[in-house]
Image (tube, coloured by chain):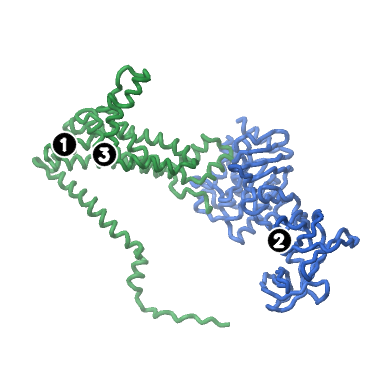
Chain colours: A green, B blue
Amino acid sequence: MTIHVADHPPAAARPTLRRRMAAAGWDRTTLLVVPAALFVLLLFIYPFIYGLILSFEPMKGGAFSNYTAFFSDPYLYDTIGTTMWLALPATVLNMALAMPIAFRVRNLRWQRALTTILVIPITLGTVLVAEGLLTYLGPQGWLNRTLIELGLSSGPVRLTHNYWGVFLSLVITGFPFVFLLTLSYVTGIDPALPAAAATLGAGPSRQFRHIFLPLLVPGLAIAFCLAFVQAYSVFPSAVLLGAPAGPTRVISIAAYQAAFEQYDYSMASAIAMIMAAVQLVVVVAVLAGRRLFYRGPMGSGKG
Amino acid sequence: MPRAEGARQHGEFGEIRLDRVSRGFDGVMALQDLDLTIRRGEFIAFLGPSGCGKSTALNCVAGLLSLTGGSIWVDDRRIDELPPERRGFGMVFQNYALFPHMTVRKNIGFGLAMRGVPKAEAEARIDAAIRLVQLEAHGTKLPGQLSGGQQQRVAIARAIVVQPPLVLMDEPLSNLDARLRLEMRHEIRRIHQELGRSTVYVTHDQDEALSLADRIVVLREGRVRQIGTPEELYARPATLDVARFMGYRNVFEGELDHWQDGGQGERVAVRRHDLRVVGMPREALGSGRRAAVAIRPEDVLPGPEGEDAISGVVESVEFIGREYAATALTPTGLMLHFRSHQRLHLDEPVHLRAAPERVLVFAAEEGA
């Protein structure tokens, strides 16, 4: 039996444009990225560049005078530490709370209902949560009334218009976010892995240390970064629940005051750039630590 | 470490006894009253279709599922209350369950590290295990860089390097392609013969069970249908279910015709419409007039026309190497699977016979 091979196309023919683009990794599906890329360019990159340039065009003085002004005035540069002192503990606490709860919840049947409930605070927005907390935690709020009623406290505990009000609101608005991310990472781990570790002699704590933790760290690092950035840019609750002139004068308040009280957009841009730089330093540090861990598929083979 | 000492002592067990082991899920019994004694060095296969309770049984032995009834004993020590990490059985998972963030060596050495085996000894044992599964060149790779067959070998090495008294394997070959499956089957057999570790092997593949096991436990709907050697199960399945599962593809019902004592044991004839077959009763046929006949395709052969032959026409022919697998349709609409050494043509008339000692007669199924 003979097999007739179809005639080859003329060898000299140049591949079509589509083929050449496909060879370079640009097929039609990839082109679908273009609108999103344009969107990001217009709404993020352009304002960022604009702000960056603006920050070097101060109302008076040289190109760097905004920055020198910021770092020579403790009223301004202290906001970096103040914000950090709110954002870091709140994020760490949220991570610490989310992890055990995610472990407990991953096998529950009402996991779906719970995650739905937890999404609600995210949709409410920080202002509404701050308003609610203001009355709930206030001197006449339910919490203080209950505490006094039960005799646990002689007078109202002060939880608003200070550090704790802002801290609590950061925990409440940040937790669902951290929890949902953590839950998805925890449930992404094949349950056969801890089972295998158990048959090899690892009890629960060693399963956590040797199997769960190393596999979770890369995901948790991402969750940490997102939650931290969110917390570091706290503004409404710092104003509503905190003491915006003192202990909770966060960096976004400084930027706001520069922009809308002193009408110094250039200074405000400089503060925003400093804020971005601080966030970037933390994110880069965390992501650099993440590189030390395994980041491949969470599966366990070809299952 | 005292736990490690204990585990090593368990390696010297005499037998592992499952006593009426049961497991229910929300009131549905997935496994009921499994009685089995695993002798030292024995290779046991749990065989059955999916959902028969075989994996449940294995997980109960491993300690990954708690029992809802019964007990498990290693000699005179009751272990069903112990968590998996205190039982010290090695397990090979269906999807291998290799730790994706650890190298092949780390994976294999995990159990040794958990047992606190000194580093030098651990390294030597890892080397030996890697040699045993022929992965010498892959020790520093991550599981994701290995093929399915290689991952399987790592999983086996990881389970046996701790020298467990019992190795549990949960459908370890089901994710491999046909050729590799055959190869790994030989490999598992070789490793078992080399190390002599007691093994419980779960599979839905009768060929795997027949070729690997010393004894097979056939499960269906959570209950044991038969326990026996491969030879016993192959030749003398205890129930119609087991027969079906062991490759008796020709199963049909008919009326008990009459009893007949052919001198070499009891014989019984079953009539269905115009055809009549003689076979051996495999269980008490009761007073009912209905009976079911089971015959393997390999035992049905075409021959000359005759009164004792079942006549039909060829429905389909398939070359399976060495011979042809064919089906024939009788005038009364019965489909028979048979084998032929010659190529047959469609619609060609054939006359089929099966030796009475190869024809099994069971009581008819209830409500069938």
Q: Residue at x 39, y 36 (%)?
A: A95
| Mark 1 neighbour class, 10 Å CA radius: few under 14, some 14 to 19, many 20 or more | some
Towards the viewer: B177 or A141: A141
Q: Quadrant of the N terminus of chain B?
A: top right
Disc 1: host chain = A
Percent position of residue B144, x then y:
50, 52
Q: Are callouts 1 and 3 both on one chain?
A: yes
Towards the viewer: A245 or B95: A245
Farthest-out residue, right? B263
What amino acid is found at the position of numbered circle 2 in the picture? Gly
Disc 3: host chain = A
- Is B111 on the left or on the right of B40, as rendered? left
What amino acid is found at the position of numbered circle 1 in the picture? Gln
Percent position of residue B310, x then y:
78, 72
Vertical comparison of B146 with B17: above or below: below
* Residue B303 visible, this angle: yes
Indicate the quadrant where residue B160 lies: top right
Label 2 vs label 3: CA separation?
69 Å
Percent position of residue A264, x then y:
12, 40
Q: Are callouts 2 and 1 both on one chain?
A: no
Q: Secondary structure at mark 3?
A: loop
Indicate the quadrant where residue A176 lies: top left
Count of labels shown? 3
Quickly name the residue at label 2: B247
Quickly name the residue at label 3: A233
- Is B353 on the left or on the right of B163, as rendered? right
* Residue B136 visible, this angle: no
What amino acid is found at the position of numbered circle 3 in the picture? Ser
Quickly name the residue at label 1: A257
